Image (cartoon, grey):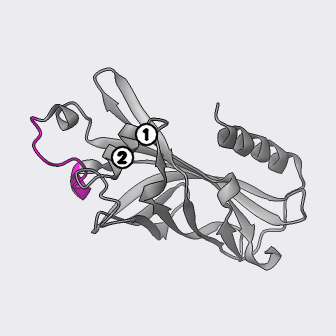
Amino acid sequence: MKAKTIKWVVAAVVMVALAPAAARADSFVIDPDYTLVQFRIKHPAGYAGGNIQTFAGTIETDKKGALAKISGTAEVNSINTSEAERDEVLKSEDFFDAAKYPQIKLDSKKVGKDQIKFSLTMKGITKDVTMSYQLHGYAIDQFGRHKIALTIKGTVNRQDFGVAKGDEADPARKYLDDNIELWIRMQGILKADM
């Protein structure tokens, strides 16, 4: 288990153990130290996956403490699959094209009880995607900061965004599943506490 994953798990346990903060309408800044974006795609031998190491944004709640809005930006150049050559392929024009489209943007359009409808922009293409989420709760961390924790899970069709959409006879694409599985485990710090 990687260090950042261990850190996130430990932090989640600590937050559960602490007394919950009062629910209210608030705005939180995503904490990069305790936010993990992971992805994977199926191929004949199993799965290939990795993470996006730089993800920033905001989380907003309503007066009842329910999730109201999320906006986030992922930096394509921070893709890490623990294999440098594969990282460069994913950043290339054929896949995510980091040089031309350095960011992937996610903005909520509608937040339901356990699902979020997002506007997702990737490679200059914007489409609606719906993902599930779990709001883990609120807490005060060891530094006295009010925090929120949640997990988002969903799939994105790579063909919809032109990811590896070239000649499908090419082995690099032919055996890739269309769906990219995505998990975002995030914590936010109350803006007033920063």
Instruction: Depth check: give the residue in front, 3 or 149.
Output: 3
Q: Quadrant of the N terminus?
A: top right
The residue carrying mark 2 is: 88
- 142 up-or-down from 177: above or below: below
- 68 up-or-down from 87: above or below: below
| Residue at x 65%, y 59% (from the top left corner) | 32
| Crowd class of label 1 (few under 14; some 14 to 19; many from 20; radius 10 Å) | few
| Residue at x 51%, y 62% (from the top left corner) | 112
Whether 167 is among the magenta residues is: yes
- 170 up-or-down from 99: above or below: above
Whether 99 is among the magenta residues is: no
| Residue at x 63%, y 53% (from the top left corner) | 35
Is residue 115 toward the left or the right of residue 139 in the image?
left
Is residue 109 toward the left or the right of residue 163 in the image?
right
The amino acid type found where label 1 is placed reads Ala
The amino acid type found where label 2 is placed reads Glu
Question: Under tag 1, what secondary structure?
Answer: helix
Q: Main secondary structure of the magenta part?
A: loop
Q: Residue furthest top?
A: 45
Disc 1 to disc 2: CB gap under 8 Å: yes
Q: Which residues are magenta?
A: 159-169
The residue carrying mark 1 is: 84
| Residue at x 45%, y 46% (from the top left corner) | 182
Image coordinates for residue 63, horizontal then vertical, percent: 71, 76
Question: Under tag 2, what secondary structure?
Answer: helix
Is residue 115 toward the left or the right of residue 1 in the image?
left
Image coordinates for residue 48, horizontal then vertical, percent: 39, 32
Q: How many marks?
A: 2
Image coordinates for residue 12, horizontal then vertical, percent: 75, 46
